[in-house]
Amino acid sequence: MVVDGTYAKMWISEGILFFVYKEIYEINRSMAREIVSQRLQLQNENSYPIFCDLRAITNAQKEARDYLAIEGAFMTTALALLVKDDHAMAITQLFIKTSTPDYPIRVFKDKKKALLFLQDFK
Protein backbone atom coordinates (compact mmCIF):
# COMPACT_ATOMS: atom_id res chain seq x y z
CA MET A 1 0.00 0.00 0.00
CA VAL A 2 1.24 3.48 -0.91
CA VAL A 3 0.05 6.62 0.88
CA ASP A 4 0.36 9.61 -1.42
CA GLY A 5 -0.41 12.48 0.93
CA THR A 6 -0.31 16.22 0.48
CA TYR A 7 3.23 16.54 1.85
CA ALA A 8 4.83 13.12 1.43
CA LYS A 9 4.61 9.76 -0.26
CA MET A 10 5.16 6.70 1.95
CA TRP A 11 5.12 2.94 1.69
CA ILE A 12 6.52 -0.16 3.39
CA SER A 13 8.85 -2.47 1.51
CA GLU A 14 11.04 -5.32 2.78
CA GLY A 15 10.57 -4.31 6.42
CA ILE A 16 11.44 -0.62 5.93
CA LEU A 17 9.06 2.31 5.85
CA PHE A 18 9.99 4.63 2.98
CA PHE A 19 9.06 8.25 3.43
CA VAL A 20 9.71 10.75 0.63
CA TYR A 21 8.78 14.38 1.19
CA LYS A 22 7.29 16.33 -1.68
CA GLU A 23 8.71 19.73 -2.55
CA ILE A 24 7.88 21.96 0.40
CA TYR A 25 9.41 25.30 1.25
CA GLU A 26 8.70 25.12 4.98
CA ILE A 27 7.04 22.55 7.22
CA ASN A 28 4.94 23.93 10.09
CA ARG A 29 3.51 22.10 13.12
CA SER A 30 0.12 21.53 11.50
CA MET A 31 1.75 19.91 8.48
CA ALA A 32 3.95 17.79 10.76
CA ARG A 33 0.89 16.52 12.65
CA GLU A 34 -0.81 15.48 9.40
CA ILE A 35 2.34 13.76 8.15
CA VAL A 36 2.77 11.76 11.37
CA SER A 37 -0.91 10.81 11.43
CA GLN A 38 -0.68 9.39 7.90
CA ARG A 39 2.51 7.50 8.74
CA LEU A 40 0.99 5.91 11.84
CA GLN A 41 -2.08 4.81 9.89
CA LEU A 42 0.18 3.16 7.33
CA GLN A 43 2.19 1.42 10.07
CA ASN A 44 -0.99 -0.10 11.56
CA GLU A 45 0.53 -0.38 15.07
CA ASN A 46 3.80 -1.95 13.84
CA SER A 47 7.22 -0.42 14.47
CA TYR A 48 9.61 0.02 11.54
CA PRO A 49 12.98 1.47 10.67
CA ILE A 50 12.31 4.55 8.55
CA PHE A 51 14.08 5.83 5.47
CA CYS A 52 13.21 9.54 5.21
CA ASP A 53 14.14 11.48 2.08
CA LEU A 54 14.40 15.17 3.04
CA ARG A 55 15.94 16.41 -0.21
CA ALA A 56 12.82 18.31 -1.33
CA ILE A 57 12.44 20.21 1.97
CA THR A 58 13.88 23.70 2.26
CA ASN A 59 13.07 24.47 5.90
CA ALA A 60 11.09 23.33 8.94
CA GLN A 61 9.85 25.58 11.72
CA LYS A 62 11.23 24.79 15.18
CA GLU A 63 7.78 23.72 16.44
CA ALA A 64 7.49 21.29 13.54
CA ARG A 65 10.99 19.88 14.14
CA ASP A 66 10.24 19.42 17.83
CA TYR A 67 6.95 17.68 17.07
CA LEU A 68 8.57 15.35 14.55
CA ALA A 69 11.40 14.51 16.97
CA ILE A 70 9.12 13.70 19.91
CA GLU A 71 5.56 12.74 18.99
CA GLY A 72 6.63 11.94 15.45
CA ALA A 73 9.12 9.33 16.64
CA PHE A 74 6.44 6.96 17.91
CA MET A 75 6.84 3.41 16.53
CA THR A 76 10.25 4.15 14.97
CA THR A 77 13.03 1.60 15.52
CA ALA A 78 15.69 3.56 13.61
CA LEU A 79 15.80 6.53 11.27
CA ALA A 80 17.97 7.23 8.22
CA LEU A 81 17.65 10.77 6.89
CA LEU A 82 18.67 11.44 3.29
CA VAL A 83 19.79 15.02 2.56
CA LYS A 84 21.03 16.66 -0.63
CA ASP A 85 24.21 18.48 0.36
CA ASP A 86 26.81 19.22 3.06
CA HIS A 87 24.89 22.27 4.32
CA ALA A 88 21.73 20.23 4.92
CA MET A 89 23.86 17.49 6.49
CA ALA A 90 25.39 19.92 9.01
CA ILE A 91 22.04 21.46 9.97
CA THR A 92 20.37 18.06 10.34
CA GLN A 93 23.22 16.64 12.43
CA LEU A 94 23.07 19.67 14.74
CA PHE A 95 19.33 19.14 15.22
CA ILE A 96 19.90 15.46 16.05
CA LYS A 97 22.50 16.34 18.69
CA THR A 98 20.11 18.75 20.40
CA SER A 99 16.99 16.56 20.20
CA THR A 100 18.57 13.34 21.59
CA PRO A 101 16.21 10.76 20.08
CA ASP A 102 15.59 7.41 21.81
CA TYR A 103 16.40 5.40 18.68
CA PRO A 104 19.38 5.16 16.34
CA ILE A 105 19.42 7.98 13.80
CA ARG A 106 21.93 8.93 11.10
CA VAL A 107 22.11 11.40 8.25
CA PHE A 108 23.26 10.39 4.76
CA LYS A 109 23.84 11.86 1.32
CA ASP A 110 23.92 8.36 -0.21
CA LYS A 111 20.68 6.34 -0.39
CA LYS A 112 22.41 2.95 -0.50
CA LYS A 113 24.36 3.69 2.69
CA ALA A 114 21.17 4.88 4.40
CA LEU A 115 19.34 1.67 3.52
CA LEU A 116 22.30 -0.44 4.63
CA PHE A 117 22.24 1.31 8.03
CA LEU A 118 18.55 0.36 8.48
CA GLN A 119 19.03 -3.37 7.76
CA ASP A 120 19.96 -4.17 11.38
CA PHE A 121 16.74 -2.63 12.71
CA LYS A 122 14.14 -4.57 10.69
Image (cartoon, helix red, strand yellow):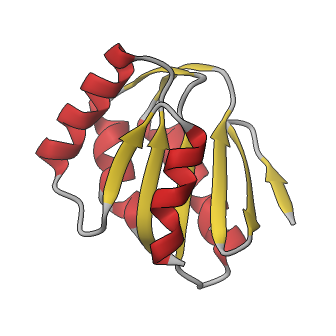
Q: Is residue 48 above or below residue 19?
A: below
Residue 116, can we see it?
yes
Residue at left offset 60%, top offset 23%: 56
Find residue 6 and report its horizontal and vertical position in percent: 74, 37
* Residue situated furthest bottom in the rendering: 45
Q: Is residue 23 above or below residue 79?
A: above
Q: Is residue 28 above or below residue 33?
A: above
Residue at left offset 59%, top offset 49%: 35
Q: Quadrant of the N terminus?
A: bottom right
Residue at left offset 45%, top offset 51%: 80
- Count of numbered labels shown in the rendering: 0
Q: Determine whether, in the image, residue 82 is placed left or right of residue 91.
A: right
Find residue 72 and report its horizontal and vertical position in percent: 42, 59
Residue 75, can we see it?
no
Q: Determine whether, in the image, residue 76 is placed left or right of residue 91.
A: right
Residue at left offset 54%, top offset 78%: 122
Find residue 23 and report its horizontal and vertical position in percent: 66, 21
Q: Determine whether, in the image, residue 83 is placed left or right of residue 17.
A: left
